[in-house]
Image (cartoon, rainbow, N blue to C red):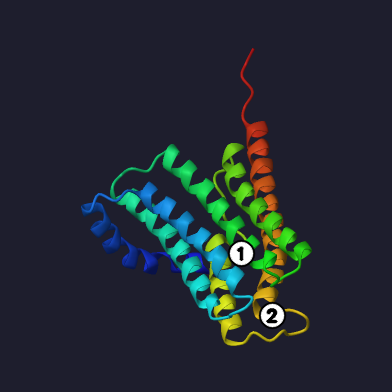
Amino acid sequence: MTINSFRNHATKILHPLALILEKRRITANNLSILSLIFATLSIPMYYYSTNDHTYLFMAALFVFLNSFTDALDGTLARITKTEGPSGDFLDHIIDRYSDVFILCAIFFTGYASLKIGLIAVTGVLLTSYLGTQAQAVNAGRHYGGILGRADRLVIIILATIATALYSEKIFYYSILGWSMILIATTSHITAIQRIHHIWQALKKESEDITKLPKPYK
């Protein structure tokens, strides 16, 4: 995941903002809910952009704000020491709804075909599921692979802006449409990578158990 390599740099920006929010008694859960609102607001922007492409700039802004508040809520939770199962659960639910809202807004408004949209949505949901399922089988959370959520949102933001600037189709699809094809493809590749990683981790764990000395009877 390319964007994750910039996590330390992002933290330097997010940390002081989180401190300000802490003083104003804004919670991490508040930010999580706000991120969902931003994702929801992107839907009408994509819808109206079919008649006026300038709405795509607003759509890109709302997707960015969704990504930004999603990153900020984790930082705020760590600062306020309010990390816990309930907050983690809420964050994951909101992220999945946000993903579906944004992706569906793009392909339901005609920037990509329904088939491509469904492939993209299933790929995104599978990668997210596998990330947490790894923990459920005691393999630890795993969010590796070529395309994480942050990478995906950056692609959508850039493609949305690019389409606003150049709306002509390139081989049947706009730039935003091609970004959906990219996400649809790489999401499933990421899912396969995560399946392989989890399977290898479980296999190694099983082998380690068999190597343990058997108790004397």
Instruction: Tell me, yes or no, if residue 1 can be seen here.
Output: no
How far across and how far down the image is residue 201, in percent? Answer: 64, 45
Instruction: Tell me, yes or no, if residue 149 can be seen here.
Output: yes
The three-letter amino acid code for the residue at tag 2 is: Ser
Which residue corresponds to the image point at 57% horizontal and 76% vertical from the top-left? Answer: 160
**Mark 1 or 2, closer to the camera:** 2
Q: CA distance from mark 1 to mark 2?
A: 21 Å
Dividing the picture into quarters, in which one does residue 7 lie?
bottom left
Q: Is residue 13 above or below residue 203?
A: below
Instruction: Left or right? Give the position of 198 relative to 165.
Output: right
Which residue corresponds to the image point at 67% horizontal and 51% vertical from the top-left? Answer: 126
The number of numbered badges drawn on the structure is 2
Which residue corresponds to the image point at 69% horizontal and 80% vertical from the top-left? Answer: 174
**In front here: 54 or 33?**
54
Q: Residues at badges 1 and 2 in contact (C-beta under 8 Å)?
A: no
The three-letter amino acid code for the residue at tag 1 is: Leu
Residue 116, numbered circle: none
Q: Which residue is mark 1?
A: 147
Which residue corresponds to the image point at 71% horizontal and 64% vertical from the top-left? Answer: 184
Which of the image's four quarters has the C terminus?
top right
Q: Is residue 40 above or below residue 49?
A: above
SS class, disc 1: loop
SS class, disc 2: loop
Which of the image's four quarters has the N terminus?
bottom right
Q: Is residue 59 above or below residue 22?
A: below
Q: Which residue is mark 2?
A: 174
Sequence-wise, the earlier of marks 1 and 2 is: 1
Label 2 crowding class (10 Å Cα cut-off): few <14, some 14-19, many 20+? many
How far across and how far down the image is residue 196, in percent? Answer: 70, 52
How far across and how far down the image is residue 43, in percent? Answer: 57, 63
Label 1 crowding class (10 Å Cα cut-off): few <14, some 14-19, many 20+? many
